[in-house]
Image (cartoon, helix red, strand yellow):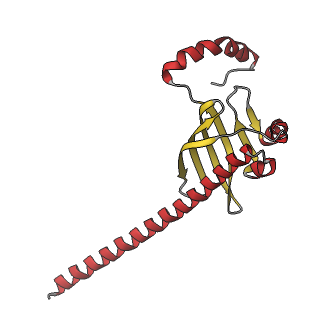
């Protein structure tokens, strides 16, 4: 073999080795991402179950101390302490709310310390959509922000708009200035 052929051979071996290493690194990242997603989804499922079981302590331990819960009503923008105060009587009755996940999409950021998700839920209000952001705190996923909305089929939207038009108009008047 000539020197030129040796050089090409070793260059090819080097490239293949490098590609193999890149693939191993990518696989490691994907495996780690899947583990993180599984842990996060366990947290979300436990959070929903805690509400169904009226387990106040567990429910709020799975939220960050500055967590936010946005409810289906336009007035429901609950900061953590307010949400605890609102929720406590419901939990004390032994029945808070029951959200059963039907479908969920979960995503991890590049730094792997933030997760966001969206889910379809079976609830007493019918199908709802939840979406949230989770942060990694002390190696545990916690819900930092959650938004619940009632899923309205597009073909029913006009009826719903008309149904809430008067209430919306009054509520808008009670707000300070519109956000532009």
Quadrant hosting residue 130: top right
Instruction: Say whether residue 137 is left or right of residue 1.
Output: right
Outermost left residue: 1
- Quadrant in which the N terminus appears: bottom left
* Image side of residue 81 versus residue 151, left or right: right
Residue reaching furthest to the bottom: 1
Residue drawn where x is 78% and y is 44% of the image: 54
Q: Which residue is at the front of the view, 40 or 66? A: 40
Query: Which quadrant of the structure image shows residue 13?
Result: bottom left
From the top left corner, tell me how far across and down residue 50 is, in percent. 73, 48
Q: Is residue 84 above or below residue 75?
A: below
- Whether residue 134 is visible to the viewer of this picture, yes or no, is yes
Looking at the figure, which quarter contains the C terminus? Answer: top right
Q: Residue at x 39, y 68 (%)?
A: 23
Relative to 175, say whether 67 is above or below: below
Which of the 4 image quadrants contains residue 152? Answer: top right
Q: Is residue 121 above or below residue 37?
A: above
* Left or right: 90, with 49 as reference point: right
- Residue 83 percent across, percent down from the top left: 79, 38
Q: Position of residue 135 (x, y in %)?
A: 66, 53
Along the line of sight, the residue nearer the viewer: 57 or 112: 57
In the image, what residue occupies the spot 49% across and 65% down? 31
- Tell whether 106 sits left or right of 80: left
The answer to whether residue 112 is seen in the rendering is: no
Residue 170 location in percent, x, y?
Answer: 72, 13
């Amino acid at each position: 073999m000539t020197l030129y052929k040796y050089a090409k051979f070793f260059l090819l071996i080097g490239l293949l080795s490098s590609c193999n290493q890149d693939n191993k690194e990518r696989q490691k990242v994907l495996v780690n991402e899947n583990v993180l997603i599984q842990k996060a989804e366990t947290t979300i499922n436990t959070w929903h179950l805690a509400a169904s079981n009226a387990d106040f302590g567990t429910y709020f331990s799975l939220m960050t101390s500055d967590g936010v819960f946005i409810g289906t009503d336009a007035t429901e923008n609950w900061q953590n302490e307010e949400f605890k105060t609102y929720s406590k009587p419901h939990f004390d009755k032994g029945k808070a709310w029951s959200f059963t996940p039907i479908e969920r999409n979960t995503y991890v950021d590049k730094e792997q310390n933030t997760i966001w998700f969206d889910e379809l839920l079976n609830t007493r209000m019918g199908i709802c959509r939840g979406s949230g952001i989770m942060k990694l705190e002390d190696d545990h996923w916690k819900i930092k922000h959650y938004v619940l909305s009632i899923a309205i089929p597009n073909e029913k939207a006009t009826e719903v708009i008309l149904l809430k038009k008067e209430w919306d108009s009054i509520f808008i008047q009670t707000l300070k200035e519109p956000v532009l």
